[in-house]
Amino acid sequence: MKKGLTAFLIGLFAIFPFTVFLSSKASAGPMVMRVGETHAQDYPTTKGLYEFARLVKERSNGRIVIEIYHSKQLGEERAVIEQVQLGAVEMTRVSVSAASAYVRDLDALQLPYLYRNSDHMWKVLNGPIGAEILKKLEASNFIGTGWFEAGSRNFYTKRQVKTVSDLKGMKIRVQQAPLMVGMIEALGAVAAPLPFGEVYSALKTGVIDGAENNWPSYLSTSHYEVAKYFIVDEHTRVPEITLGSKKVFDKLSKEDRALIIKAHQDAVPYQIKLWNDFEKVAEKAVREKGSVITEVSPAEKKKFMDAMKPLYDKQPAEILAVAKKIREVK
Ligand code: GTR
């Protein structure tokens, strides 16, 4: 018995340094930050995140590892945003629309027919207006690490829409965001705010008559199979945003925080290039697959713009003041 105890103690002392070594190694391992992403692995935005992750790993000499959970592995956008806000998930890449349900200041960046084009939007995002809005996210426990390109959004429907008045009474899926619901209502249509992953079956079963998105998403989700009429009305340009959890970021050193934000910024030109290329590929693909594309004349586009006036009229003065500043950016 005594012999047994001695052997046990010797054994314990023998493995003690080893266990200490192992546990100290484990705590010195890389810091892993998970990013939730709704799109598939080969979507341009997801590829932008991989580039961001590559830069973070390289610049931190492997101390910080960004892991991308694409294809909704962590859940639908709204659910993951909540997890990030609580600090249970470190980061997520979402549409500004999805995040606007939590931070209404973001509405100023997604108003219909706000930007002249993508260059105008990027001047705004990269300038003081973008910086100020990123700062405002902190009050809601988010750290905005940066933006990505998502082109402009268009309606697609089960029966053809040629004019703005054709949309009247149609049930259209929008992102789960008050501004987007208001946009549909301004058009005299019925808004169906649904998670992204539910849109295909809602279109297929006829629960909704249509939805709206950019060319890449229209293709990647196969929505073109169940809503073949696409109208190029370009009603809104909604940037993507990557959100970090303030609870998590507050534990990082100032340098690491800056490293992450800079890496995201440096991944942007790559993501924009992929986006622009894929937008063309997606448009060509859906045309070949039989989608009927309706172009909008300048006169009809003006009618779409005019229809949005009641939505603008409902916006709080702060949002309208930012929108005014955005329009003034040359
Ligand atoms: C896409 C966007 C997604 C998601 C989706 C939607 O364009 O990249 O993040 O927000 O739209 O309509 O839900």
Image: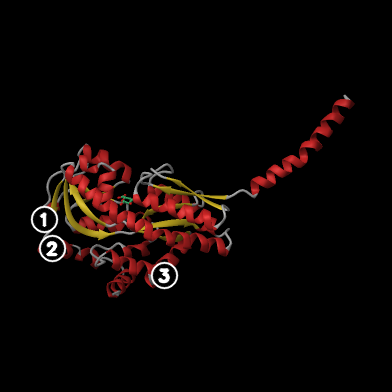
Q: Earlier in the sequence, mark 3 or mark 2?
A: 3
> Which residue, given by chain and number where applicable, does mark 1 sit on?
163
Secondary structure category for the residue under label 2 = helix
Q: Is 156 situated above or below 116?
A: above
Alpha carbon distance from label 3 to label 1: 37 Å
**Contact flag, marks 1 and 2 (Cβ < 8 Å):** yes
Q: Is residue 127 visible?
A: yes
In the rendered structure, the answer to whether residue 237 lies left or right of residue 246 reads left
Q: Which mark is residue 132?
A: 3
Q: Is residue 228 visible?
A: no
Q: Position of residue 271 (x, y in %)?
A: 36, 56
Secondary structure category for the residue under label 1 = loop
Q: Earlier in the sequence, mark 3 or mark 1?
A: 3
Q: Is 306 situated above or below 78?
A: below
**Which residue is depicted at the point 47% across and 61% down?**
261
Whether disc 3's CB lies below 8 Å from ligand 1 is answered no
The crowding category of the residue bearing disc 3, from other C-alpha atoms within 10 Å (few below 14, some 14 to 19, many at least 20), is few
**Contact flag, marks 3 and 2 (Cβ < 8 Å):** no
In the rendered structure, the answer to whether residue 316 lies left or right of residue 55 reads left
Residue type, mark 3 in image: Glu
**Which residue is depicted at the point 21% across and 56% down?**
185
**Which residue is depicted at the point 39% across and 53% down?**
48
Q: Earlier in the sequence, mark 1 or mark 2?
A: 1
Residue type, mark 2 in image: Lys
Q: Position of residue 182 (x, y in %)?
A: 25, 58
Q: Is 201 situated above or below 181?
A: above
